[in-house]
Image: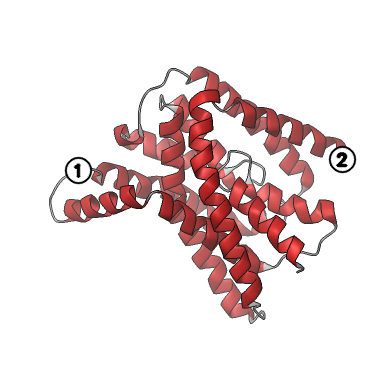
Amino acid sequence: MDFVQIVVLAVVQGLTEFLPISSSAHLILVPVLFGWPDQGLAFDVAVHVGTLSAVIAYFRAELLAMLRDWLASLGGGGLAGEARLAWGVLLGTIPAALAGLLFHDLVETTLRSPRVIAVATLGFGVLLGIADWVGRRGGRSEQALRWRDAAIVGLAQALALIPGTSRSGITMTAALFLGFSREGAARFSFLLSIPLILLAGGYETRKLLLSGEPVDWQVLGWGILLSGLSAYLCIHAFLKVIRRLGMQPFVLYRLLLGAWLWYLFA
């Protein structure tokens, strides 16, 4: 990989992981459109480490409180403080984790096509727009999470295995339909990403170690650094943008991108 490819793919991953526009779709499409060779498993693992580091750093205070109260709940302290949110994140992770184990091969082969990405980008983009309009008066924060909410958002998250869906997009869509505020939906989506990225990263790291693929540590280091910085800035900017403009700019982007992809590959 040359340095331009490293920068572009790392920044694309950092920006799209938490925006409702599908990081997997962009990582598949960017090399295709530029005629670049596949970046390889090691680089994919590295940029996911970067985005994971970013979301942990951004929500470090909330995560520490969630961990403290979750541990207290295990000792009989009940669901005080952030314990309910911590349990909700764990509950919401189960459907996607199971779906990933069951359908991983299907996703990595049959579903990695530009047509699938185009249809998913368009369809779930329209759904996000409807959810944003329906739920624009929603006022619930992530602290008001119920078990039913965690289960429904978790089931929605499993759909993100389809390239073009967007993990953050589909979870925010579900949360908006459930009456969460835009910011509450986004913050819960970001917190929900942490265990899933950990699980997926662990699975891919195991594959990498077993494959014996040579590792260029300098390339991986740049991937981690650039994806992490861009993801951190993206989270901060996104939470400010949706407070003022809602999800509509991202809906418009998805519709334009989906239509363009359909024109190119249909």
In the rendered structure, which amino acid carries the disc numbered 1? Answer: Leu
- The answer to whether residue 238 is left or right of residue 90 is right
Q: Secondary structure at mark 1?
A: loop
Looking at the picture, how far across and down is residue 41, in whole percent? 65, 68
Question: Up-down: is 211 above or below 164?
Answer: below
Looking at the picture, how far across and down is residue 255, in whole percent? 72, 30
Mark 2 is surrounded, within 10 Å at the Cα level, by few (under 14), some (14 to 19) or many (20 or more) other residues, namely: few
- The answer to whether residue 238 is left or right of residue 113 is left
Q: Secondary structure at mark 2?
A: helix
- Residue nearer the viewer, 79 or 110: 79
Number of marks in the rendered image: 2
Q: Residue drawn at (51%, 18%), measured in percent from left and top?
A: 134
Mark 1 is surrounded, within 10 Å at the Cα level, by few (under 14), some (14 to 19) or many (20 or more) other residues, namely: some
Q: Can you identify the residue that label 1 sits on?
A: 79
Looking at the picture, how far across and down is residue 208, in whole percent? 60, 74
Quadrant of the rendering where the N terminus is positioned: bottom right
Q: Residue drawn at (21%, 56%), measured in percent from left and top?
A: 71
Image quadrant assignment for residue 46: bottom right
Q: Which mark is residue 264?
A: 2
Q: Earlier in the sequence, mark 1 or mark 2?
A: 1
Q: Residue drawn at (54%, 57%), measured in percent from left and top?
A: 228
Q: Residue drawn at (67%, 31%), measured in percent from left and top?
A: 123
Callout 1–callout 2 Cβ contact below 8 Å: no
Question: Up-down: is 10 above or below 42?
Answer: above
Quadrant of the rendering where the C terminus is positioned: top right
Marks 1/2: CA distance? 51 Å
